[in-house]
Image (cartoon, rainbow, N blue to C red):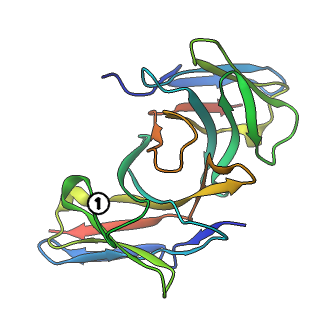
Amino acid sequence: KAGVTQTPRYLIKTRGQQVTLSCSPISGHRSVSWYQQTPGQGLQFLFEYFSETQRNKGNFPGRFSGRQFSNSRSEMNVSTLELGDSALYLCASSQDRSGGNTIYFGEGSWLTVV
Amino acid sequence: AQSVAQPEDQVNVAEGNPLTVKCTYSVSGNPYLFWYVQYPNRGLQFLLKYITGDNLVKGSYGFEAEFNKSQTSFHLKKPSALVSDSALYFCAVRDLDYGGATNKLIFGTGTLLAVQP
């Protein structure tokens, strides 16, 4: 069974540009969540999607947005990029919202903003 | 609000010795606790989880964790450390809302495990 797949793995953007990151969850998983990891702030929750609906949102500005498609694939978008957005963006998937389910992570997308 | 704390930024242990990576938690309901490992420039790999039941949870790569309700701890352990265990380890708790469990994980700050040959 394939794991959580994130694309692209590495990208470099310029300040002011926008970026879209993609995530394909494990087959059969309907929940996708996104995290930002930086050396200074650690792992921070961005948002969670389940059945194409955003169920949870972290404390990030409106420049960060996401969506989930009917096949459970998800994208996140960051507009008007700032230098501080440079980070590893991790996608995670779970079968549903049951507390006992395991949450699996992808390898991440490394974003560098210059 | 749910939270976890990892009191040690780094743990050093000699290969072959037992290792412990500490985690304490604070939850308002049933704790759903997880351990993940991150190797350099990689994503997070699931090691083990505590949902309910047996306080000793066994996971991947020979790791186990002991859930202690009275001490609100969930320490990660391994009887004999390997150099290849050197990595960043994260403890996490599943957040809860009015509907119960969510898929939002709240992470500790991470503990760097260094195993010396």
Residue lying at the far top of the rendered structure: A70
Q: Residue at x 44, y 40 (%)?
A: B43
Report x, y in % for residue A6: 50, 24
How crowded is the residue under tag 1: few (<14 C-alpha within 10 Å), some, or many (20+)?
A: many
Taking A93 as reference, is A11 above or below it? above
Looking at the image, which residue is at 24% across and 68% down?
Answer: B115
Which residue lies most toward the right here? Answer: A62
Q: Quadrant of residue B108?
A: bottom right
**What residue do we see at 86% from left, 40% from top?**
A61
For mark 1, what is the residue?
B86
* Residue depicted at x 48% and y 33%: A95
Q: Is residue B14 above or below residue A23?
A: below
Give residue B18's position: percent from left, percent from top.
Answer: 19, 77
What is the x, y in percent for residue A46?
Answer: 71, 41
Q: Position of residue A19 (x, y in %)?
A: 71, 20
- The N terminus of chain B, quarter of image: bottom right
- Looking at the image, can residue B102 be seen? yes
Relative horizontal placement of residue A30, taking residue B44 as reference (left or right): right
* Chain under numbered label 1: B
Q: Quadrant of residue B58?
A: bottom left
- Give B76 or A89, whichever is nearer the viewer: B76
Residue B27 sits above or below residue B42 on the image: below
Residue B39 visible, this orientation: no
Relative vertical location of residue B25 with respect to residue A22 in this rendering, above or below:
below
Task: Tell whether A52 sits left or right of B117.
Answer: right
Relative placement, left or right, of B86 versus B51 is: left
Q: Quadrant of the C terminus of chain B?
A: bottom left
Q: Amino acid at mark 1?
A: Ser
* Disc 1 secondary structure class: loop
Front residue of B48/A5: it is: B48
> Quarter of the image holding residue B56?
bottom left
